[in-house]
Image (cartoon, helix red, strand yellow):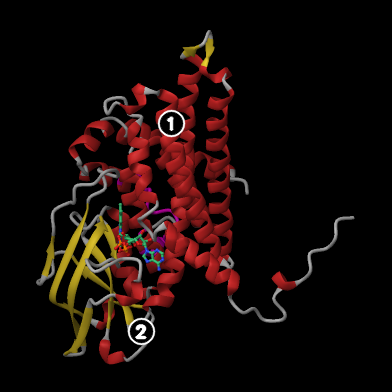
Amino acid sequence: MQWTPDQRRRRRHFHDFAARVIAPGSAGRDRAAAFDRSLWQALADEGFWAARVPAEYGGSGGDLWDFLAGFEGLALGADDCGFVLSAVAHAGFIQLLLDHGTHEQRADLLPRLVGGAVGATAATEPGGGSHVAAITTSAVRRDGGYLLSGSKSHITNAPVADLMLIVGRVPEAGGHDITLFVIDAGQPGVERGKAEELLGQRTSPTGAIEMDHVPVGPDRVIAGVGQGLETLYSFLAFDRLMYGVVAATQLENMIDLARRHVTTRRAFGAPLAEHQFIQDKLVDMKVTLEASRHLAYATVAALLRDDPDLGSLASCTKLTASEGLVRAGTELIQIFGHLGFRTDQGVERYLRDAVAFRIAGGTTEMQKKNIIKFLLRPRPASDPAREPVPAPS
Ligand SMILES: Cc1cc2nc3c(=O)[nH]c(=O)nc-3n(C[C@H](O)[C@H](O)[C@H](O)COP(=O)(O)OP(=O)(O)OC[C@H]3O[C@@H](n4cnc5c(N)ncnc54)[C@H](O)[C@@H]3O)c2cc1C
């Protein structure tokens, strides 16, 4: 995979923009657990969300790779993983509308999401997040539409969102009833909790949504009643590959930080960089960076060709990226010794932010469950994966 010259320019542009506009003050926002809406608006004004959205919906008509080039630039330059994960949640909403929205839904919602509105996607409930099919938020049919009631928790962007994609169910639809709804935050019956106090990702406002008989028109049902789980399939794959993209950029920055330290700090008469146990940590970071990034790219390609192994590949990406990132965060502190353990040096933030990667977007355990399900599933006789591997010549 190679970026085109235009994509490279886009990556560089958003890297420089993020370094100039978003990175300043990021450590203070992390301490204060603050989301700066003006930065979000500045990013939208810079045309960040327009890539990949057709011009008729307020975009500039690029493709997914164009969007990812800009996203990598943002994630590399922003020095603000929470802000970037808020952007991942928003990007997932846009992706879902592009893949599954009707023309009317796209025309109604995309210009807002491209222009600075904040989107949230809400599946997790106070009763649990791993078992998505067990959600209890439900919609009863009323006057040709629905009244939606239920509670969501730990939802990225919920405290500041303008538009929220809600995973609910329509019990009258029978066994196949999981359904996706879009609601406006200002609708009657919608209440949002305060941002939760988090260990990491503190600049990403995360919280609860309460819905009490919220009226939703049939035009705000995405992909049809009962189609929620199937629709979430490609959404989750996208979300999980984005964790791979972001983890790789975090690792790139962590390696830079570590490299500066190990080449200047000395122990036993030599720079730390000359000690093999230290080198081993840097090697592991580099391998995780490349594995996360290239698994993410492979998942993008699988998404674009509708590959049947998409879900498994996306889980491999997320598992590799998030486990490797937490390992790297721990070792980064180790490389810095007591300086890494201090909370005023900007080293420990990488680990605090990394821990969320193992939970949000489906936990590590759920990725393993997904991968093993794919591995053990019955396969048709014509499945190319059953072809014997040719002997090496
Ligand atoms: C920073 C952050 C942002 C988030 N943003 C969003 C968001 O935007 N939208 C959203 O819908 N949710 C969001 N979440 C919630 C997240 O998706 C859930 O936390 C996650 O799905 C796990 O659900 P849970 O926390 O309820 O854990 P539980 O489902 O209660 O699971 C608890 C533990 O048990 C394990 N476990 C559960 N079942 C099994 C099993 N069968 N086998 C082995 N282990 C199992 C889990 O892996 C986990 O380790 C976010 C979470 C975080 C931390």
Q: Residues within 10 Å of mark 2 (few under 14, many from 20)?
A: many
| Label annotation for residue 301 | none
Snapshot quadrant of residue 89: bottom left
Q: For this view, does 107 lie left or right of residue 252?
A: left
Image check: 31 left or right of 64? left
- The x, y position of residue 235, in whole percent, is 42, 66
Q: Residue furthest top?
A: 269
Instruction: Determine whether 167 is above or below 27 in the image.
Output: below
Percent position of residue 226, x then y? 36, 84
Q: Mark 2 and mark 1: span between their CA atoms?
A: 46 Å
Q: Nearer the viewer, mark 2 or mark 1?
A: 1
Seen from the viewer's position, the closer of residues 66 and 193 is 193
Q: Secondary structure at mark 2?
A: loop
Question: What residue is shown at x 54% (from left), y 47% (from top)?
Answer: 293
Q: In the image, ligand 1 is in what quadrant?
A: bottom left
Q: Main secondary structure of the magenta part?
A: loop
Residue tagged by mark 2?
226
Does the image show residue 112? no
Is residue 56 visible in the rendered structure shown here? yes
Residue range in magenta is: 45-58
Q: Residues within 10 Å of mark 1 (few under 14, many from 20)?
A: many
| Left or right of 1, for residue 40 | left
Q: Earlier in the sequence, mark 2 or mark 1?
A: 2
Residue drawn 55% across and 61% down? 313
Task: Quickly name the residue at label 1.
Answer: 332
Task: Say which residue appears at 71% left-offset and 81% top-offset.
Answer: 381
Beta carbon at label 1 within 8 Å of ligand 1: no
Q: Check residue 235 for magenta coloring.
A: no
Q: Are marks 2 and 1 in contact (CB under 8 Å)?
A: no
Which residue is pictured at 41% across the width and 74% down the height? 231
Helix, strand or loop at disc 1?
Answer: helix
